[in-house]
């Protein structure tokens, strides 16, 4: 199984794939538009995380610029009716944070923005993934607090994130707009060594949202 590729990006299809040359072997890698946009222009060295899908007639490689998007790809494909191509379509249309927010708020309309996702499939996604909201918060916290930090820090960050979102929701802010702001604020405060006390996070988030 291939978990990562680092090589010369020799071709980039604007639709859904690229070719990466690793020691003379060109690997066709399917990606979302989001990952394609983050790759360098050919011919330059690129690194992508790989999810290998083995079928009877082919071995397919799906590439991601970050582990957060790959985790969402894996999670989406656990839903009945969501195949690998559909998962890429969703990730090309919605960011991981938007998907997370849609699931936490049961926002069916947001999910149906992705091509091929009708009302029935959107409901199925919400139903099958709604019970995983806690793990989704932990995933966001992992982006804010890297894997190298202790698990307790990520757990505390996830709790602060959740509490701040609830507080802002009570003030009239929708999660879809406040979640990326709160995550950004927590990361900035953590990087600056100021800590991430709830009241400070809320104050800084309100300042950002006011802009």
Image (tube, rainbow, N blue to C red):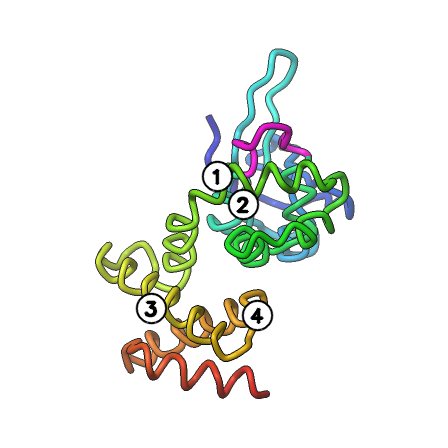
Left/right placement of residue 70 relative to residue 150 reads right
How many C-alpha atoms fall within 10 Å of the one at disc 3: few (<14), some, or many (≥20)? Answer: many
Residue range (magenta): 76-85
Cα distance between the residues tagged 4 and 2? 33 Å
The tag on residue 48 is 2
Q: CA distance from mark 3 to mark 2?
A: 31 Å
Residue indicated by mark 1:
4
> Is mark 1 in CB contact (under 8 Å) with mark 2?
yes
Mark 4 → mark 1, Cα distance in angstroms: 36 Å
Residue depth check, mark 4 versus mark 1: number of the one nearer the observer = 4
Q: As displayed, is residue 131 above or below residue 80?
A: below
In the image, residue 79 lies in the stretch drawn in magenta: yes
**Residue 183, horizontal then vertical, whole percent:** 45, 69
For marks 3 and 2, give the one nearer the viewer: 3
Residue beneath the point at 59% across and 31% down: 61
Find residue 160 and name its label. 3
Label 3–label 2 contact, CB within 8 A: no
Q: Is residue 193 magenta?
A: no
**On screen, 26 above or below 91?**
above
* Magenta stretch: helix, strand or loop mostly: loop
> Considering the numbered disc 3 on the image, is that residue within a helix, a strand or a loop?
helix
Answer with mark 4 or mark 1, whichever residue precedes in sequence: 1
Chain-order first, disc 1 or disc 2: 1
Q: CA distance from mark 1 to mark 3?
A: 32 Å
On screen, residue 121 above or below 204 = above
Viewer-side residue, 73 vs 20: 73
Dot 4 or dot 3, earlier in sequence: 3
Looking at the rendered structure, the secondary structure element under dot 4 is loop
Q: Mark 4 or mark 3, which is nearer to you?
A: 4
Q: Earlier in the sequence, mark 3 or mark 2?
A: 2
């Amino acid at each position: 199984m291939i978990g990562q590729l680092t090589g010369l990006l020799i071709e980039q299809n604007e639709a859904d794939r690229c070719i990466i040359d690793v020691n003379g072997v060109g690997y066709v890698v399917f990606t979302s538009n989001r990952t394609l946009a983050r790759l360098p222009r050919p011919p330059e060295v690129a690194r992508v995380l790989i999810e290998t899908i083995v079928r009877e007639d082919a071995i397919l490689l799906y590439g991601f610029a970050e582990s957060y998007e790959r985790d969402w790809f894996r999670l989406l494909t656990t839903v009945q009716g969501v195949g690998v191509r559909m998962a890429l379509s969703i990730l090309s249309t919605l960011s991981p944070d938007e998907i997370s927010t849609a699931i936490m708020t049961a926002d069916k309309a947001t999910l149906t923005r992705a091509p091929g996702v009708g009302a029935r499939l959107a409901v199925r996604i919400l139903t099958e993934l709604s019970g995983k909201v806690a793990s989704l918060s932990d995933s966001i916290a992992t982006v804010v607090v890297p894997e190298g930090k202790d698990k307790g820090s990520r757990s505390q960050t996830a709790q602060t994130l959740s509490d701040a979102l609830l507080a802002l929701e009570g003030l009239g802010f929708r999660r879809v707009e406040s979640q990326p702001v709160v995550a950004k604020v927590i990361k900035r405060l953590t990087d600056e060594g100021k800590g991430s006390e709830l009241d400070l996070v809320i104050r800084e988030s309100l300042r950002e949202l006011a802009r």
